[in-house]
Every structure is written in C-alpha cells, then in structure tokens.
Image (cartoon, rainbow, N blue to C red):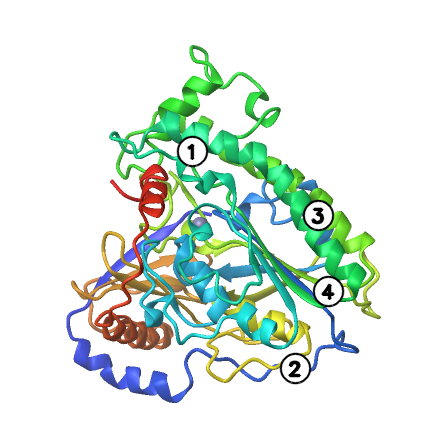
Amino acid sequence: MKRQVKHIRWIGFAVLAGFAVLAAVIALFRGPNRLENASDLYPLQSAVLITIDTLRADSLGFSGHPRIRSPVLDRLSQRSTVFSEAYSNLPLTLPAHSAMFTSRFPVEMNVRTNFDYVPDGYVRLPEMLRDLGFRTAGFPQAILSFPRGTHVGFDMYDKMDLNDRKTVPNTKRIPNPRVLMEAKSRNIMIEEERIERVITWVRERDQRGEKYFLWLHLFEPHAPYAPRAPYRYLDPLVSNESTDDVIYRLSSLWRVKGHAFSDEDQNVSRRLYANEIVWTDGLVDPLLRFLTYQTRDHPFIMITSDHGECLYDSADYFGHGYSLLREELHVPMLIHDPRPVADRTSRQPVVSSQRIQSVDVSPTILGALGLSPPDRFRGRDIRDLSDPDRLIPCSISTIDSLVGIVGPAGILTLNPSSGEWTLTSTEDPEGTGFMSSDKSLPDFLQPMMALALEYASLNSSSMQTETAPPEDPGFMDMLKNLGYLQ
Ligand SMILES: [Zn+2]
C-alpha cells in the first residue's frame, strides 16, 4: 500500500499540556480488564520464549510474505494465535529484550541503547519464576550474552562461542567484514549444537517433572545477511561476483545510513535477509517438534522478535535502531497454548489484530502459567485483551531523540527538541487528511499526541539517572563488529 507521510509542525506545546494530564488520568498504558480465558482450565507447568532477532512482521509465510517460506513456523501457527499488530517499544536488541523481561518501558529504566545496562530494582520475569520454584535457563546470543541485566534470574545463562573474545579480535578497521563474517560463520556452525543443548536441558526438566522457563534467543537474520548453505547458494546472485564476495562487499554497507545501493544490490540484500529467515525457520524445527510432541508436559510457547528491519524500503539504509518506521517496530508474535480449545476445529491460525507490545511478554507468560502479574507491570496479558483503541508508546535516540505512538491512525512521532510531529499512516491514507503546518489538529490524533507528550516526559525525566554499566572490552568489540559503534 502506498505510504503517506505527512508532517505537522507544531510549536505550542502548552496547548496540549492538558491532554498530558488527561493521559495520566486514564491510565494511558493500560486497556480494559482481561476477560476469562477459555483455555485456563488448568495452569500450564512451563513456558518457552523464543526471540528471533531482527525479524520483520511481514517476513514469514504465515504473515503473508509473497515469497518467503517458513514451513516450520507456519505449521506451528496453524495451532496458535498470531498477533498481526505487535510492536517493539524500542527497536534495539537490549532495550527491547529488557522491556520483555521487566514489563517496563526501556526509557523509564534508562535503557536506550545496546550500551546500557538494565538497572537493579526492576523485577525480571525469570527472577519471579525462579523464586516460585521454576528452573530457568537463558540461551542468548551476541550482545545479550554479556551480563547487561537480561541475565538476572536465570539459573543458567548459556554463552556461545561468538562471544569468545578470541573470535572477535579488536579490529582497527571497523566494521571489518571479514572478521565479522568469520565470527558469524562460526556462530552458524554452533547453532545446531546449541539447539541440541536447549533440547537436552528441557528433556531433563521434563523427565524430572520440574516446571521451567526457557528463553532462546536466535541472532539471525541480523546483519550481516550471510545465510548458510544451501540457502547461501540458491542461485547466482550477481553476474560478476561470487556470493561470498557479494556478502563481504555489502556487509560493511548495510548499516550505513544514506549509502546509495544499486537496484541489484538492494535485491540481493533482501534475498540474503530472506534466506537467513528460511535457515532460522529450519533451525528451530527439532526444538519445536520436541516441545510440542515429545514432552510429557507441553509448555506454553511464545515466539516474537525484538524489532524489525528496514530493508531500504521506506528509508535509506538496511538496519534498525535509527527511526520509528513501521519496518523497524512491527514484529511477529505467535503464542501456542497446548491445552485443547473446544471450539477450535480448523487448522488455521487464530489471527488477532489486537495492538500489542514488547512489555506484554512477561504478563502473558505469567498469565499462561496461572500467575498474576505485579501491578507495576506496564504490559497486559494479550491472550484475551480486547481494546481496539490501545496505543503503543515507542522511542529511539540513536540519531534524533524521538518518541512515537502506534495507534489506529498509524505511527505518530514527536521530535521533542524541534517540536515536529510526523504521522506515518499505512492503513488508511484517507484518514490522515489534515493540513500540515497547522495548529488546529484533527481530533482523532489528540489521544496519540497526549500519550506522546506523556512518554516524552517519562523519557526526559529518566535521562537524568545514571546507570553506568561495568565496561567490558569484549562487549565493546562485539558492538563494533556488528556495526553499532563506529
Ligand atoms: Zn535485535
């Protein structure tokens, strides 16, 4: 659908101060009370969260991608609920995962970048479950393998060799594609072994009758897009270069904002990204088969992503963490409840268009386990949430400090320093028919503007707090080699 972007310049903040107050009063971040879930006949013993990094919502078979085939996830989706309107609260890996585990907005924890640290004082889902007698294991990758706060509460926090400092030397030229490619190749070699370790861990819990919470983080299809054979060599990519040379050449450019990609390089990049997804889909096959067929107590399964990926479509880069475009915020969300549902006969996904967000992950998992979330959680149990007007706050501060609200009208973004508002509507171009540079703003935008101001206030007040993490040279090298740090 043709994207319409309209800019509203708005100077008089005072006009809307009243809306900010109103916003607080109506408990902005919450929707109506959750309804009784028909499948809550008995609580589940265990839960599994799988986060597939950098996975756009529209990049899977079940979400309607015209060419990408994801048969494993598609098969699971047929017995699951798929949320078509799931969004990241901050499109970067550490902030988004911290929102999932704490059910608090990244900005209020002062977690805005991958350099930050989730401070003490915010209770994390694995911590709560461990204290209730669950066994907890996290299998993270890349930057999440470092103890930046997402490790709290896990009995076991499995590291992989990509984070072995020997594999990521301190490079002088950053990012060094060959070093990165070597590290990533090693990563890929290790992935299948890692899945085996995950299965072994679950099997032991299951055989002992222990309840558990498992988190698996898969780093692909994060850039560099370097799928493994056979997905690496499906067909000739370009006429004059080998696939390896193409990947090496492009891997130092993908995260460069403003680089002019040829049409051919754009197409190649998108195909490589797609092929990484196909590979990842196959990777999780043995784990999902085990969880859904071979365990005594089938767990609740949630699969989502921390953020999407801009593929040089709405903006001039391949990557994420730069803006609040839909491509970066919109993620897949699938929940699989193994308990029988009486009225479910067809093998089609139940699709919900309920708008949901990263902070909903923890309350939903708690709910599935028959546990109540703490009042201080920002998110909601999404299983029976029904609120078509629900607004999703998000932010980014990599280039400009922006706050945004995802709502029925699209994504409304505020640049607090310039006072500029931008509305990006993907759903209803006719519904954005207001004049730019006009202070008389349409009524339908006012709830979103009020929440944006509230969120901007939350953002700026928490910026004052210091959450200095322990610096780790290996962690900094990792960020440099992934292109986050120049
Ligand atoms: Zn990520």
Element carrying mark 3: helix
In the rendered structure, the answer to whether residue 193 lies left or right of residue 30 reads: right
Closer to the camera: disc 3 or disc 4?
3
Circle 2: residue type: Leu
**What is the quadrant of residue 170 in the picture?**
top left
> Which residue in the structure is indicated by mark 1?
167
Q: Is mark 3 within 8 Å of ligand 1?
A: no
- Secondary structure found at label 2: loop
Answer with the quarter of the image where residue 416 lies. bottom left
Which mark sits nearer the N-terminus, 1 or 3? 1
350 vs 57, left or right, is right
Up-down relation of residue 79 to residue 233 (above or below): below
- Residue 149 visible somewhere in the drawing: yes
Read off the residue under disc 4.
337
Label 1 – label 4 distance at C-alpha: 39 Å
Q: Are marks 2 and 3 in contact (CB under 8 Å)?
A: no
Mark 4, other Cα within 10 Å: few <14 / some 14–19 / many ≥20: many
Q: Which residue is at 37% across, 66% downward? A: 106
What residue does disc 2 label? Answer: 35
Front residue of this view, candidates 374 and 71: 374
Judge by depth and name the residue closer to the eye, 107 or 324.
107
Q: Residue at x 27, y 73 (%)?
A: 462
Going from N to C along the chain, the mark reached first, 1 or 4, is: 1
**CA–CA distance between discs 2 and 4?**
17 Å
Place of residue 146 in the rendered image (x, y in percent of width and height, measured from the top left): 42, 52
The picture places residue 195, in percent across and down from the top left corner, at 65, 44
Q: Residues within 10 Å of mark 2 (few under 14, many from 20)?
A: few
Q: In the rendered structure, which disc, 2 or 3, sits on the residue that comes first in sequence?
A: 2
Give the mark toward the camera: 2 or 3.
3
